[in-house]
Amino acid sequence: MKFGYFDDRNKEYVITTPQTPLPWINYLGSEDFFSLVSNTAGGYSFYRDARMRRLTRYRYNNSPLDMDGHRIYIKDGDTVWNPGWQPTKTPLDSYSCRHGLGYTVVEGKKDGVTARQELFVPKGDACELDRVTVCNESAAVKELDLFSYVEFCLWDAVDDSSNFQRNYSTGEVEVEGSVIYHKTEYRERRNHYAVFWANCPVDSFDTTRDAFCGVYGGPADPQAVRAGHCSGSIAHGWAPVGALHIHLTLAPGESRSILFGLGYIENPQEEKFIAPGVINKTRAHAMMARYATDAQIDAARIALRTHWEELLSTYHLESGEEKLNRMVNIWHQYQCMVTFNMSRSASYYESGTGRGMGFRDSCQDLLGFVHIIPSRARERILDIAATQFEDGSAYHQYQPLTKKGNRDVGSGFNDDPLWLIAGTAAYLRETGDWSILEEQVPFDNDAAKAQPLMEHLRRSFNFTCTHLGPHGLPLIGRADWNDCLNLNCFSEHPGESFQITGPSEGPVAESVFIAGMFVKYGHEYAELCDHLNLTEEAAAARKHIDAVEQAVLTAGWDGAWFRRAYDAFGNPIGSKECAEGQIFIEPQGMCVMAGIGRETGQAAQALASVEERLDTKYGVVLLQPAYTGYQLNLGEISSYPPGYKENAGIFCHNNPWISCAEATLGHGDRAFAVYRKTCPAYIEDISEIHRTEPYVYSQMVAGKDAPTFGEAKNSWLTGTAAWTFFNISQYILGIQPTLDGLKVDPCIPHTLSGFTVTRRFRGAVYHITVDNAAGVQHGVKAVTVDGKAICGNVLPLAAAGTEVTVQVTMG
Ligand code: BGC
Ligand code: NOJ
């Protein structure tokens, strides 16, 4: 069943009922100011950091769900309704929500009145614009009361939701005409406030939640709306809100547009006040002046659209497969932007108060983002590298606002260092900007300890070399990519973190997965050394890599697939010798991608085992058989019921690894079949089973052992976004940036007769047509560039500013 449809021309998903199986959200903003907005206009806003600079409140895990948001109420006689249905849930005569690239338009119609709520964050500004257009489509004059309402968060989202003995007494506002200034804590150490405004005179306002909602009322039935006006309340402590009311008299056919804005303003310390206790509003006035008229707001909308068109023009596919085109050209890349911005911090499942930016997560996000805005990727790489320790290990997470490592979680996730090589190498392949390796980057954010980025990569590589276990495989530490495989944890007490309980330096437990990574990214590191003429270092690196590869092919090989790990007692995990958890997905994907066992047959055999043992109709599960009980030597993975999350869920993130791995063996049919199974557009028809948004990936889909097989959770913020785009664009369609130029090496289903990709690369535009009349899965027979045959399939670098036509014949 579907709850909407794709509108590819407008690059939107159109939702046709507010009662989707779960809230289906969108992200507004891609620089500093962000808002999450659901299909009923629920959601919340923050500046840079969802924990430390939260502008509006959101109650996660609420019942009913999704009550807080960017709310518009219309009172028409005795009827009160919202254009997005929530929170009054007054039945609408018609409803739609269009989630587009950086904007959302929610439209409802009731008793002859249409209200359209258009939300977006303008480029280059720290505010959300919420334009409401009300149209009287009835034959009679309408007297309407329009209210816009937000509930402020007192900045630190954790303190805001826990420290009531203090924060019930700190709330402060100022009101000036149609503008409410939320200035809690501005009197003391903060130099920032929020501004909530309308671009026209208002008839009344409220700034206390009690006055607007009623102490025992709530957003579903606010007493001020029922009364038809606000009471001019001024918040002193308790819960400051922004509520603005405008009375509208609309003749038949008449419509009116009003802008409500929510902005974030920072003042220099010495310019905070203009009089004792009176905040300096100059910057707020300037912001409001930028969006005073419809023409200004339209211009901001157009600038946003143009920006996205430009971003998406870097990689554009025409394949004759509608669903594939839509995912590649729009939604995969859009989700890559969102994961790049958010890492795993703020979604409808990540509260923004827990994790900041993940070291491994953000490095992987680069794989799908680096072509979109290389300069931002560059900056991110340097930020991430600055959280590395001198021994090459790394803080597992850092806060986006401070860019400092999170000490509570610390380090010890032994895959982390290698992901820095992965992200940096991807950046170099895309840009050829070797200067990044010379950038001086601190260790542990200490400028006194700065070294060139290349030195950081070297220490990443060496960290693995110096942390090998009894079988010559890398030590796993607290965990590798699989945060829940905690082989050194042994937690017996509820509430202990599986990730940071127990020693991070366990001297025995080893990871075959990290070994696969070391081979793959170690080779990428060695290639950088080659390029820098570090011949001896490259040779030494390859020796280390070969040794680890041998360890994988011996201790890491189980007979028909790659083992997963060795536990703290030296027993294999992911082996036929185990009662449960005999085969895991991760090492099969990573080791095959690394090329391990390609010539000798183990690679193909491992993937055949995946197909036989892990594949399901909804995707490849993480392991089999699922763990049925908690096991001290395994940690969190065995804490989940069978079929959920890392315990045999379909963890979407590593499905593309299998697809990539299949592609490296030339199996185009299978690579695409794996891609398709979890791909949102291809499973839109089962939205009632899948439940999360049909335009983006979720972290996990319940596996076959779960009673809810096929149900997804944790949408949006997942490494699946980057890996899937990396997979489809580079492994399957085969347009691969390399250090030397763009390589074309498709691995596609034999039924795909061809496709064209327009690719902007290092300033030039390549129009690449791939002809597969031969009906093969892999293999390039001939390549011409501007009509001239070339040798091999790496395109000569075209000069920046030029366009070249490339014809590729498969066979
Ligand atoms: C989740 C993992 C996540 C980890 C770290 C676990 O509870 O299952 O997917 O990576 O927490 O936050
Ligand atoms: C989600 C985490 O963000 C990611 O870092 C991890 O690799 C996966 N879960 C698997 O545990």
Image: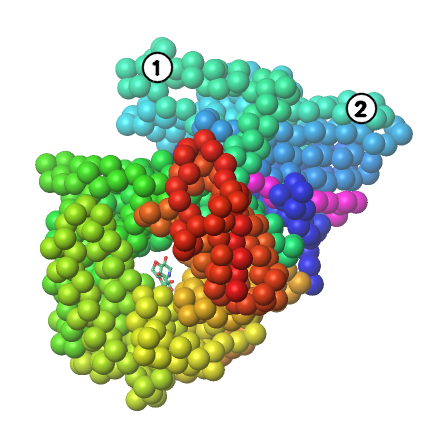
776 up-or-down from 427: above or below: below
Label ID, residue 254? 2
Q: Quadrant of the N terminus?
A: bottom right
The figure's colour scheme reads rainbow
Amino acid residing under circle 1: Phe
| Quadrant housing residue 603 | bottom left
* Range covered by the magenta-colored residues: 91-101
Q: Nearer the viewer, residue 636 or 740?
A: 740
683 up-or-down from 172: above or below: below
Label ID, residue 273? 1
Q: Nearer the viewer, residue 760 or 607?
A: 760
Looking at the rendering, the quadrant in which ligand 1 lies is bottom left
Amino acid residing under circle 2: Glu
Q: Residue at x 58, y 54 (%)?
A: 755
Q: Earlier in the sequence, mark 2 or mark 1?
A: 2
Q: Nearer the viewer, residue 194 or 440?
A: 440
Q: Nearer the viewer, residue 230 or 680?
A: 680
Q: In the visual, does 729 lie left or right of 436?
A: right
Q: Which SS class for mark 1?
A: strand
Between the residue at mark 2 and the residue at mark 1, the CA separation in whole angstroms equals 43 Å
Residue 100 lies within the magenta run: yes
Task: Give how far across and how far down residue 78 sits, in percent.
Answer: 77, 37
Residue 76 lies within the magenta run: no
How many residues crowd mark 1 within 10 Å: few (<14), some (14–19), many (20+)? some
